[in-house]
Amino acid sequence: MGYVFTRDDVAYLVSAAGKAALAEANGFALTATSLLEDLTRLRRDHGERAPILAETVRLRRRAAVKLDGAGQWLFTDDALQQATPTAVARHRAERLAGRVVHDVTCSIGAELAALHPVCPQVIGSDLDDVRLAMAAHNLATMAAHPVRNVLLARADALAPCSGAEVVIADPARRADGRRTHDPARLQPPLPALMAAYPGRDLVVKCAPGLDFDGFVPRRPGAGTEDPVARPNRRNGRPGAATDMPQWEGEVEVVSLDGAVREACLWPAALSDFGVTRRASVLRSEGESWTLTDAEPDDIDHRPPGEWIVDPDGAVVRAGLVRHYAAKHGLWQLDPHIAYLTGDRVPEGVRGLRILDRLEFREKSLRAELLRRDCGPLEILARGVDVDPDALRKRLKPRGTEPLSLVITRIGRTPTVFLCRTPAVR
């Protein structure tokens, strides 16, 4: 846990003296190895303010890859961890453009910053006075002119205090100090949020590991299982058994530059008709795209093709592997595994060219890798209980040729595909 900020700290940091001190602190390395010495030097000029200066500079540097304008923002450590990346917040704001929106867990204002340019009025509320003060400062840094369409207020997310068309909530994802995938253990709990806003268009941001299959019904006629192997103890996520009221709408899983960032629950009124699952793949560079369960999912059942494709995590987590395959002329290695195969790779996607198909026997694998002069070795595993790092150490590749292993199962048989190192087509 980082430094615990107070309202007095925020008042100092936004003052002329505080801004000058932050500019000075920004000249220090403030790394793990230099922090003690840097704090000692900061204390000579700034006394007891040194820790808040160092913490703010360090948080701003961490936030730079996540939030636009972070070099001027204020954060707490927890607030930064949960803050929505700017690209993801703007993606959501596009779906809410033109509406009056109330963010009932606004924290330091990352969502508000994306909403205010496209919404006529935005309300942000939170129970934390410090975060509200930080949000006010952060919004003030967003434009050359004052942000006049945002109202900030201290309020409980479970006590409705506005008539906004849309309510957004981002519950904390920890319970008893541990990360939770159970929607009923979020803070505030999802059932309580749903009960607090009956008949309202409620949008809820959740962690990407949310166990939503039990309470977000699938499109009529769709299967009940993702085409993905059940998680194992190393690469899966724990299930969450809970009694939840059904969510009438969609779950959208969003990734940014290949990393799954969140699952967002949308009410039916703000979703396309009949859509219950959506994967949105955002790119900082290149084209972003969306896939839904309203699209076809009929695919062939054929032997492995020339390539293996590992779909974006948003597609896998949303249970849209078959839909993605159908869209790109691919098919599955196994009906219950998310790896896809085909004779071509979709544009802009990493593909693994299959060199050989082998039994999963370490002794014969080691010999084959030696024969091929394997050096750098990528190991992908799904549907089998394999620790890639431990296996790589046992295989001991010492050559120069970069290769990849895809370890999975076809039917009940563990199978290895030896592949050339990934390339983007």
Image (cartoon, rainbow, N blue to C red):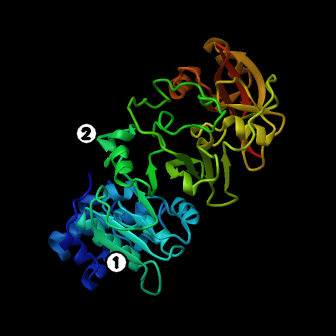
- The spot of residue 335 in percent (x, y) is 69, 24
Establish if 390 lies above or below 420.
above
Q: CA distance from mark 2 to mark 1?
A: 38 Å
Residue type at mark 2: give it.
Answer: Asp
Residue 223 can be seen in this image: yes
Residue found farthest to the front: 199
Name the quadrant containing residue 277: top right
- The residue nearer to you, when weighing 396 against 12, is 12
* Number of other residues with Cα within 10 Å of mark 2, as a class: few under 14, some 14 to 19, many 20 or more: few
- The residue nearer to you, when weighing 39 against 295, is 295
Q: Secondary structure at mark 1?
A: helix
Q: Is residue 397 left or right of residue 8?
A: right
- The spot of residue 165 in percent (x, y) is 46, 66
Name the quadrant containing residue 368: top right
Establish if 223 lies above or below 283.
above
Residue 29 can be seen in this image: no
Disc 1: which residue: 23
Residue found farthest to the right: 343
Residue found farthest to the bottom: 145
Q: Residue at x 35, y 49 (%)?
A: 195
Q: Residue at x 21, y 69 (%)?
A: 50
Please give the label number shown on residue 222: none
Do labels 2 and 1 touch, CB within 8 Å?
Answer: no
Question: Of marks 2 and 1, which one's residue comes earlier in the chain?
Answer: 1
**Number of marks in the rendered image:** 2
- The residue nearer to you, when weighing 29 against 237, is 237
Disc 2: which residue: 176
- The spot of residue 189 in percent (x, y) is 33, 45
* Number of other residues with Cα within 10 Å of mark 1, as a class: few under 14, some 14 to 19, many 20 or more: few
Residue type at mark 1: give it.
Answer: Ala
- The residue nearer to you, when weighing 243 against 229, is 243
